[in-house]
Image (cartoon, rainbow, N blue to C red):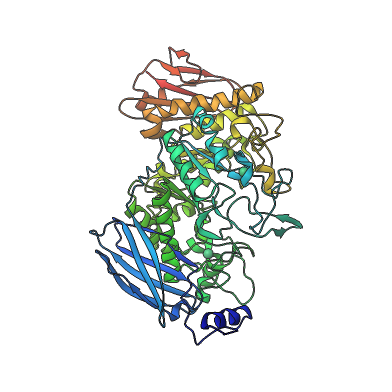
Amino acid sequence: MKLTKQLLILILVQFGIVCTVYSQKPQITRIDPTNWYVGMKNPNLQVLVYGIKIAKSNFTLKPYSGVKLKKIQKVENPNYLFIDLEISKSAKAGSLEFVFAEGNSKNTIKYELKNRSAKPQGVDQSDFIYLLMPDRFANGDESNDKFDDLNDKQADKNNPFLRHGGDLKGITDRLDYLKELGVTAVWMTPVIENNTELTDEGGTWRSSYHGYHFTDFYQIDKRFGGNEGYKKFVNDAHAKGIKVVQDAVYNHIGLTTWFYKDLPSKDWINQWDTYTNTSYKEQSIVDPNGSAYDRKICSDGWFTKFLPDLNQRNPFLANYLIQNAVWITENFGIDAWRIDTYMYNDLAFMNRCNKALMDEFPKIHLFGESWVRSVFNQAYFTKNNINFPFKCNLPGTLDFMVQTGILDGLNQNYDWDGGVQKLYQILAQDGAYQDASKNVTFLDNHDTDRYFSVVGEDFDKYKMGITWLLTLRGIPHFYYGTEILMKNFKNPSDAEVRKDFPGGFKGDSENKFTKQGRNAKENEAFDFVSKLANYRKNSEALTKGKFLQFVPFEGIYVYFRYTNNQRVMIISNTNKEEKIVETARFNEILKGSKSAQNVLNGTNLNDISKITIPAKTSWVLEVK
Ligand SMILES: [Ca+2]
Ligand SMILES: [Ca+2]
């Protein structure tokens, strides 16, 4: 048999012998961002190319009107190449051609430049955000519950630590339920791919059903519906007047992230000689007298041993993360970002990332998770009025302090500093923020005990806290199931507060998405939230108005939301007995008004100079 050149190569390859004399076509495994856009405010784009020894190839860009090749950069690892392009305002949508050559072999890759179409709306005080966990809300497609080609191949609704199969289709099918509740925006725990292995946490094997262990920034998890499913979800939600908030994680990645297995350079990760966890002590970041050592541990220590901490001071990684955030916003058309573990990121990087998003999408809203114990520290991690040497540019923050104030207001006994005085005192520090109305307020979330349990399943307290949430300044967010009195503490694990929404899964014995499926108490709760949230939507004072609060007196807390056209008075009696409240001290805003309408039950109060309010009750009164 005559050996042809091709056959010889085939045999060499067959036997695993690398043929070095014959130049092979450069192989490219991945290019990120997967595409880009024309008409961006920032003309610069840095493309990451990944492929075996790709740095050895010669790169050229086929001439394309309005696009300039600025730089080709190599890093420590020869499997990466970074290509810097400048895309001018005049560039039109189309396909760039990237040519990688090695010897006389070439690989030409088309790279698409698309027209922009996303119009992020942002979220503001007129919104009511509903936080849900997509794995735990509703399963709309059982064919995507599990896949054999993923590291975690399981789905089991009966195991609290494994995936349950919930997905975007399930949520789309429940958008009318959310609309009825008065919701205007959905925030889901992350939808980015988490192709992780099960991890042994405290003796139990756990999946990353919660979504916080990213493995590919450019893929929506296929168990939720993948990129196409997410695009459809955002479009369907927008068509129903519901905005979408995405959950971002810049601080860390999952252990099976493709680039972690073959790092571009060692310093993409904050490396330590021995494993170092973050101290979670944000005080060390805020403290003017704090040590550099403590700051480094807090910021560069790993969130857990399963989550390599990203070194955002590496300029290639920083570009990679920022471009991904811009790409997701543009590609899927989301309206706002919630940013996970904000305090443990490199804050200078976060400022650059926030600015990039705000430059490209002027209406977008960004708010971070900074779980703190003081208004002063909370203000550090958002735009503030305090003379800190570091100036954070994040427009809003999750308001953990108002959550503390509301819960203490409901659960503590009223005294000089206790009970509702706590809530008043926290709100009295709003001067720390440049705009407290951009803070996102809440009662509970996926990391806390459930609200109804925290208030001791006391329905009067439940209603009072919800009244505060929906009438105070800020953008309120709810946690799924609070409207149907889902309860539980995080003991023994957080899975207790992340249970399936009853009725979202095949075989569920109850369906609490429907009035018929809810019991009387659950309907009372649902109707209460729905009534107030829907009133709120159309109330100028609650969605745009100023906030005026009075010092609590004898367990009575009164505040107003108002514009030139509307005044809403919120009066709360936190006592265990009925109270008669003389209203003369509120005259700077009541201005002699005589009557008001109770928004929740429609009754009229014809003489508001004295208001008799039952025990443990909040009223929302529209002043005439
Ligand atoms: Ca499913
Ligand atoms: Ca960090």
Q: Quadrant of the N terminus?
A: bottom right
In the displayed structure, 225 sits above or below 64; it is: above
Asked whether residue 41 appears in the rendered view, the answer is yes
- Image quadrant assignment for residue 100: bottom left
In front here: 573 or 455? 455
Of the four image quadrants, the one with ligand 1 is top right
Q: Total label count?
A: 0
Outermost residue, left side: 90
Direction right: furthest residue: 203
Q: Position of residue 47 (x, y in %)?
A: 40, 67
- 461, above or below 106, in the image: above
Quarter of the image for residue 96 reads: bottom left
Residue sticking out furthest to the front: 1
> Which one is nearer the viewer's eye here, 404 or 360?
360
Q: Nearer the viewer, residue 347 or 175?
A: 175
Horizontally, residue 93 falls left or right of residue 537, namely left
Q: Nearer the viewer, residue 623 or 585?
A: 623
Q: Position of residue 410 (x, y in %)?
A: 59, 34
Quadrant location, the C terminus = top left
x, y percentage for residue 244?
46, 42
- For image coordinates 55% across by 81% down, the residue present is 9
| Image location of residue 199, percent across then percent down | 69, 59
Can residue 350 be seen in this snapshot?
no
Where 562 sits versus 216, above or below? above
**Placement of 340 over or under 171, stated as above or below:** below
